[in-house]
Amino acid sequence: MFKKVLPIIFLLLSQTTYAQYRVNWTNYDVMNPGNDLTRSIAYNRQTDHVLVATRKYGTDVIILDAANGDSVGRLNTDGISGGTYPINMVSVANDGVIYVSNLIAPQYTPGATFKVYRYDSEDGAPELVFDNALDGGRYGDSFTAVGTGPDTYIYSSGMGNPNIVVLRNTGSELVLDHNIPLPSPGAARHGISPVSPGGNIWINGADTGTPPPRLITNDGTVIAEVPDSLASPGGTSCIKHLSLGNYKLVTVSNAWSISIRSVRYFEDELGTVTFDYFGSDCDSLPLLYEGNTFVNNINATASLDYDSKRHSIISLFGYNSIASMSLDSLVKASTPRPDSLTVNIDGKNDFFPTDHVGLSNGRDLFITWSEGKLFFGVTGHTLIDPTETNRMYIALDLDPDGDAGSSTAPEEAADVRKYPFKADVVYMVEPWTEPDYLIGTIYKWNGSEWTYTLFDGNMANQGALAYGDEGEGKLTEVCAVKNDVGIGVDFASIGMLAYVAEKNASGDVLCSFPENNPLGNSVSFTHFYLADSLGKNMFPTDQKYIKIAEGTVSVEQKEGEMVPTAYRLHQNYPNPFNPETRISYDLSRSAHVKLDLFDISGRHILTLLDKRETAGSHSLTVNGRQLASGIYFYKLTVDQKIISIKKMALIK
């Protein structure tokens, strides 16, 4: 299984109006207060490193550890040459490919060509993929790469330049795609941040005056301008666009006052953009040169990127520092568990105040609602699994009263026969050998078959987020996001089923929720959770929103499989119970069966069954009226061979 180190998942807490960024670390090693040598940074989420383009030591891209800011190496820059400065900017595309550009300033180096080099990895050698004088203007003051593979686009502009040049990846090289006219010369000198490859673009910069950051189309039409009162009065430099769940933010810096500020914006169906205040300036003191000296930056050289692993902004202020600053005070990034995944909801945030909903085979299920997101957490060593055999499934029916969807599972894990409804979307989370951010698949029923897309826990716009923790909580959590690529957007009620199963068809369902559902192999689920009358942003309107419904989907036996293929003991249901519970077991052939009950100390309490049975599926009812409350174990023995021992709880 392919596994990446992935960033933390997003939950958006109530806005703290006057919150400031908390500084994680600062690095002054590549700064020089006498000259503006360090121009650009980029976060590489594939390696969890910060790349720094600097001329302090020559022609370099220094590699920093994003966790603490320490230098851990540098890129190979052999053969890089040409331009006013051979290396001025660095950017990392969505697929981890690194791009480095020079700076060409015609007033200093007439006739110089704009060069872009590509690195397939931090250990690789630079490959020249673009070398062109373009229109003779200045390029390389701003530079960014977005997209993956052939859908990668490179944007650049510079001081005095009335255009942005857009380059497109063809595989072997970059080619000129088109130019975007700017509202004024130098309007993208300090920053370019595309919303999507080939889509709208946030720009920032100026040659004269202090124009605001602006959102433009791919042909240069101005859509919106950020009010100075919300950003940073007196002018800003650089810009970073972020989509965090349902939150859209534009973060800018003011290189003259060493401040950073984010602005939230909204787009309606007509494309109208409005803005809202979102937090105050950063605490600038640690960002000053050596932590105490302000060095004025006459070129407003600054750069921003987003560290998705720590939910932090990485900033560069040319004469002063490189720093990492947490966004948690403005937009919280974690699970809804405030302390090491401890399960509780304290009512002080925007999570719906209902959490624990079920128990199955010693595992708990927690369902937590947030703004446009629905989280399912299962406790126990469910996915942190050295054998990598268990998978977690969340099946969702977006029209519980309708006929759309499929009652057949999209994967063969545990040979699940039927869902209790017709599922429209199924989320699957893969196992991993250690606690980490997890990956998985989103299945969608298209009317005739299951289609699928993969997610890697990176951003909420992938439609899913997943996280594993092996602390006291031992929690595995998957988030279904209300957007087109995730759970969808057009529904007012939802049916929900959660289960963990061994991935092979011959495996078992290890836990299932609601707990009315059976465990074992070749099971047909019968019950599901129902939340109807969903309100704005998917929050339920009913405070007692979780209902348990019984499915109406008929159970059909697969042809040729009337007889079980193995001996199997199933988990009792209900569990915990009072006073009765039912125990089921399967026999692949006729055999002598014994079923014994033990207390928690291992003392034999009674024999529930001791007889010869025919091949097939069997069950018996256990009455606990004469037993004390507590934990009990039941053991299935077939032809004097112990098949399985399972645990159950009697609570009076």
Image (cartoon, rainbow, N blue to C red):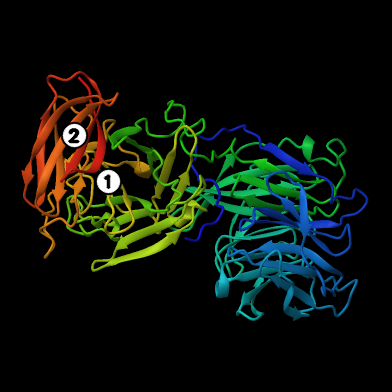
Furthest residue to the front?
A: 640
Disc 1 element = strand
Find out whether the residues at labels 1 and 2 contact each other: C-beta distance under 8 Å.
Answer: no
Residue 363 rendering spot, x and y as whole percentages: 33, 37
Q: Which residue is mark 2?
A: 574
**Disc 1 designates what residue?**
496
Q: Residue at x 27, y 46 (%)?
A: 496
Compared with 363, 250 (above or below) is below
Q: Amino acid at mark 1?
A: Met
Q: Position of residue 455 (x, y in %)?
A: 45, 58
Task: Tell me residue 480's x, y (percent).
Answer: 39, 49
The location of residue 554, given as percent across then percent down, is 10, 54
Q: Nearer the viewer, residue 198 or 4?
A: 4
Does 14 sit left or right of 513 as displayed? Answer: right
Distance from the alpha carbon under mark 1 to that under mark 2? 19 Å
* Residue 128 marker: none
Residue 652 visible in the snapshot? yes
Crowding at mark 2 (Cα within 10 Å: few <14, some 14-19, many 20+): many
Q: Residue at x 15, y 36 (%)?
A: 595
Going 51% across and 53% down the picture, which residue do you hit? 459
Closer mark to the observer between disc 1 and disc 2? 2
Q: Is residue 136 left or right of residue 582?
A: right
Q: Secondary structure at mark 2?
A: loop
The residue nearer to you, when weighing 451 against 581, is 581
The picture quadrant where one finds residue 626 is top left
In the displayed structure image, the side of residue 570 where residue 455 appears, left or right = right
What amino acid does circle 2 point to?
Pro
Mark nearer the N terminus (1 vs 2): 1
Relative to residue 267, is residue 89 depicted above or below? below
Name the residue at 34% across, 31% down: 354
| In this view, 590 is above or below 571 | below
